[in-house]
Image (tube, rainbow, N blue to C red):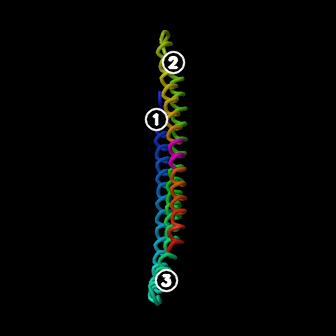
Amino acid sequence: MLTVEQIMASQKEGIETLMGLTSKAFEGVEKIVELNLTASKAALAESAEHAKAMLSVKDAQELMALQSGLLQPLAEKTAAYSRHLYDIASGSSAELGKTFEGQAADAQKKFMSLVDTAAKNAPAGSETAVAMMKSTVAAANTALESVQKAVKQATDAAEANFKAVAATAADAAKPVAKKR
């Protein structure tokens, strides 16, 4: 049977975990805000430079050269921004996932301890029910591990696809910029 102290310790642990997760989530938001501010400042400065350059253009050929010179760096900067944003999101997600996995493992240990304690204190003749309970818990743990592995594989595949698409987009912009 759970004591008041055990319940209070569990509640305290839950609150500490929630505060830690909230802190990690805010860290991710702060990084995204910082990235957006940096990107906005750079875009503003580049726009001003581009406007100055356009005002000094003397003919259409020079204008076309100026525009084509802008295309590739823009594509590369967009790809870099997307990669950085993805890195922030995946890093925050990984941290939250690690915390969740740690908490889930701890909860599984505590639950198994509770099942073992209940099994030791079970009345005679209830061995079959206890064995069935342990079997059910083991099956649930196996299913949870399978889901976690599937999510990890899907995440890894999505990350690989994102990197391939970003590289392809940056490579595709290079010939377009050179043609102009």
Of the residues tagged 2 and 3, which is closer to the observer? Answer: 3
Whether 92 is drawn above or below 130: the answer is below
What amino acid type should be assigned to the residue bearing mark 2?
Asn
N-terminal-most mark, 1 or 2: 1
- Residue matched to label 1: 4
What amino acid type should be assigned to the residue bearing mark 1?
Val
N-terminal-most mark, 3 or 1: 1
Q: Is 62 within the magenta?
A: no
Report the front residue among 110 and 147: 147
Of the residues tagged 3 and 1, which is closer to the observer? Answer: 3
Question: Which element is circle 2 on?
Answer: loop
Magenta stretch, overall SS: helix
- Residue matched to label 2: 121
Q: Position of residue 62 (x, y in %)?
A: 49, 84
Mark number displayed over residue 49:
3
Q: Position of residue 131 (x, y in %)?
A: 51, 17
